[in-house]
Image: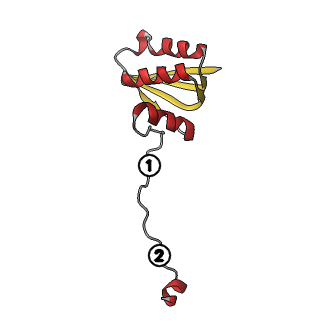
Amino acid sequence: MLRVTVHEDGTLYRLELAGKLGGPWVAETEHVWRSSSCANKQIEVDMRQVTGVDEAGCKLLSAMHQAGARLIAEGVAMTALVEEITGTQPFNGAEQPRRTKFAPRPKSPDQENSE
């Protein structure tokens, strides 16, 4: 079962998916994506509520990405899938950048005295 919710805002067309992108739901999602109402608009595919994707679903997401759609994901499995499809880390809706370096921990007074 998959729920597809369409959000349109000016030049943005957002597909919000919830459930499993597989089986007959792949064709339905493709139909919605290729509809004339999303022509000439920026497309986002919000997969934050997707619980699974089968092989056909992966192919559709790849085609959507190739056509310029922005894939939004969170969670280990969906993030890994989007990274595999796009070759980059997906947007997850959070505006904060990820930390890549850690500052050294300050020494406690006990550690300083023992040296």
Mark yes or no: residue 11 visible.
Answer: no
Q: Can you name the residue that lies furthest to the right here?
A: 1
Numbered disc 2: secondary structure: loop
Do the numbered discs 2 and 1 sit on residues whose CB atoms are within 8 Å? no
What number is the disc on residue 5? none
Q: Can you name the residue that lies furthest to the left here?
A: 40
**Relative to 21, is 32 on the left or the right?**
left
The foreground one among 82 and 19 is 82
Residue found 52% across the figure and 84% down from its top: 111
Q: Quadrant of residue 78?
A: top right
Numbered disc 1: secondary structure: loop
Give the residue pinned by disc 2. Answer: 106
Mark yes or no: residue 58 visible.
Answer: yes
Residue found 53% across the figure and 30% down from its top: 47
Residue found 48% across the figure and 21% down from its top: 59
Q: CA distance from mark 2 to mark 1?
A: 25 Å
Mark 1 crowd level (few <14, some 14–19, many ≥20, 10 Å Cα): few
Q: Quadrant of residue 91?
A: top left
Residue found 41% across the figure and 55% down from its top: 100
The foreground one among 94 and 21 is 21
Q: Position of residue 8 (x, y in %)?
A: 45, 21
Q: Position of residue 46 (x, y in %)?
A: 50, 29
The foreground one among 85 and 37 is 85
**Relative to 1, is 29 on the left or the right?**
left
Give the residue pinned by disc 1. Answer: 96
Colour style of the rendered protein structure: secondary structure
User: For the residue marked with disc 1, what is the amino acid?
Assistant: Gln
User: For the residue marked with disc 2, what is the amino acid?
Assistant: Pro
